[in-house]
Image (tube, rainbow, N blue to C red):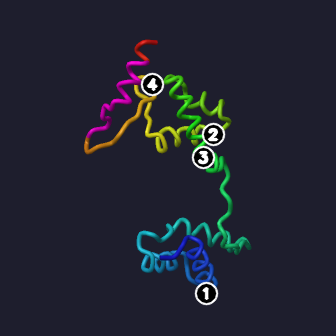
Amino acid sequence: KLSRQYQHYYTLIRWKNNKTSTEIHAELVIGEGDQAVSLRTVDHWIAAFKAGDEDVEDKPCSGCPHEVTTPETIAKVKELVSDDLHITIRGLADLLDISLERVSYILNEELNMKKICAKWVLYKLKGNKQWIESEENRSQIARTAKN
């Protein structure tokens, strides 16, 4: 399968051979299947080619870099949440000086935590059950009930 960059390059070559975006996209779908870029992406690339930008290298994305999702940051988030189960995403973002999106990602994807009744608890998905009570969750609930 071709990488996104190679599909971009293929689009440039086919566009220079007077193919339309629809034709190019159809060729990519034949060759790449569900890994093909969307027709909208092909249209976007061709618009850039017409404007004189024939660079097929991916441009760096704006926003918070993913480098903030380090083991150290994950450990800090876990520690802060363990200390205060009522802490907010905004509070964590301010304390750690990272974006709200990154804090949310770390909590949900890296630490498998979800906010239930204003408390952060671990959650696991299994079959049709959304949340399975675990020993760690019971201890968290018992700890906060004392507060």
**Whole-number angstrom distance, CA of label 1 to CA of label 3:** 45 Å
Q: Residue at x 55, y 79 (%)?
A: 20
- The answer to whether 111 appears left or right of 74 in the picture is left
Name the magenta segment's main secondary structure. helix
Q: Considering only order in the chain, which callout, 2 or 3, is on the residue closer to the N terminus?
A: 3
What residue range appears in magenta? 129-143
Q: Residue at x 54, y 72 (%)?
A: 3
Residue 79 place in picture, x, y as percent: 55, 31
* Numbered badge on residue 57: none
- The answer to whether 3 appears left or right of 132 in the picture is right
Q: Is residue 46 above or below residue 59?
A: below
* Residue type pointed to by label 4: Lys
Residue at far left of view: 128
Q: Please rate how many residues cluster around mark 1, counting C-alpha atoms within 10 Å: few if below 14, some from 14 to 19, many from 20.
A: few
99 vs 75, nearest the viewer: 75
Find disc 1 in the rendering and name its residue. 17
Q: Nearer the observer, disc 3 or disc 2? A: 3
* Residue type pointed to by label 2: Ser
Q: Please rate how many residues cluster around mark 4, counting C-alpha atoms within 10 Å: few if below 14, some from 14 to 19, many from 20.
A: some
Q: Considering only order in the chain, which callout, 3 or 1, is on the residue closer to the N terminus?
A: 1
Find disc 3 in the rendering and name its residue. 70
Q: Residue at x 60, y 40 (%)?
A: 73
Q: Residue at x 42, y 30 (%)?
A: 121
Q: Nearer the observer, disc 1 or disc 4? A: 4
**Whole-number angstrom distance, CA of label 3 to CA of label 2:** 14 Å
31 vs 119, nearest the viewer: 119
* Residue type pointed to by label 1: Asn
Magenta span includes 138: yes
Could you tell me if the residues under marks 1 and 4 are in contact, i.e. CB atoms within 8 Å? Answer: no
Could you tell me if the residues under marks 2 and 1 are in contact, i.e. CB atoms within 8 Å? Answer: no
Magenta span includes 90: no
**Whole-number angstrom distance, CA of label 3 to CA of label 4:** 24 Å
